[in-house]
């Protein structure tokens, strides 16, 4: 289930974000989390399965679109369709929005094989 990020999940979110290639540095991780906490157009979602948080999805919204900036799944839960489920849930939460991947999330999004082949700028 996709849930909204809250401050009490900060350490878990930072751990999941650290799997992103651009988020390896602690200061960069802290800066990214702060952006999601303070900027209204950026939203961070977590994927809860039973009692565990095992995935993360970060989106920057603009009008009726959203750019998926971050997507990550705990390595021990990969290859189970969780990334695909997160994106599908996001699309269900915001049916009026069109989502695109950025250069860092495109490869992952494409692996999800949602509907068709995409490039990093193709709508999801």
Image (spheres, rainbow, N blue to C red):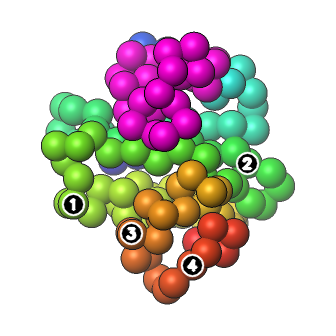
Q: Mark 3 — residue?
A: 112
Distance, label 3 to label 2, CA atoms, is 21 Å
Distance, label 4 to label 2, CA atoms, is 20 Å
Quarter-of-image position of residue 80: bottom left
**Residue 72 place in picture, x, y as percent:** 40, 44
Q: Residue at x 21, y 32 (%)?
A: 52
Give whichever of discs 3 and 2 has the lower sequence position: 2
Q: Mark 4 — residue?
A: 118
Farthest residue to the right: give it: 63
Query: Mark 4: which secondary structure?
Result: loop
**Residue 29 place in picture, x, y as percent:** 53, 22
Give whichever of discs 4 and 2 has the lower sequence position: 2
Q: Main secondary structure of the magenta part?
A: helix
Q: Residue at x 75, y 38 (%)?
A: 41
Query: Mark 3: which secondary structure?
Result: helix
Distance, label 3 to label 1, CA atoms, is 10 Å
Q: Mark 2 — residue?
A: 61
In the picture, the disc for residue 36 is: none
Give whichever of discs 1 and 2 has the lower sequence position: 2
Query: Mark 2: which secondary structure?
Result: strand
Q: Residue at x 30, y 56 (%)?
A: 82
Note whether residue 12 is visible. Answer: yes
Distance, label 3 to label 4, CA atoms, is 11 Å
Residue 44 vs residue 102: left or right?
left
For label 3, the crowd category at 10 Å Cα-Cα, with few meaning under 14, some 14 to 19 and many 20 or more, is some
In the picture, the disc for residue 79 is: 1
Q: Nearer the viewer, residue 75 or 35?
A: 75
Magenta stretch holds residue 96: no
Q: Are marks 3 and 4 in contact (CB under 8 Å)?
A: no
Give whichever of discs 3 and 4 has the lower sequence position: 3
Distance, label 1 to label 2, CA atoms, is 28 Å
């Amino acid at each position: 289930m996709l849930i909204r990020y809250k401050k009490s999940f900060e350490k878990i979110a930072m751990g999941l974000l650290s799997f992103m290639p651009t988020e390896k540095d602690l200061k960069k991780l802290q800066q990214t989390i702060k952006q999601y906490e303070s900027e209204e157009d950026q939203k961070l979602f977590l994927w809860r399965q039973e009692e565990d948080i095992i995935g993360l999805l970060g989106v920057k919204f603009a009008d009726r679109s959203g750019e998926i900036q971050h997507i990550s799944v705990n390595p021990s839960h990969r290859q189970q369709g969780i990334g695909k489920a997160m994106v599908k849930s996001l699309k269900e939460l915001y049916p009026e929005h069109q989502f695109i991947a950025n250069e860092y999330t495109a490869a992952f999004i494409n692996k999800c094989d949602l509907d068709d082949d995409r490039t990093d700028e193709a709508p999801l």
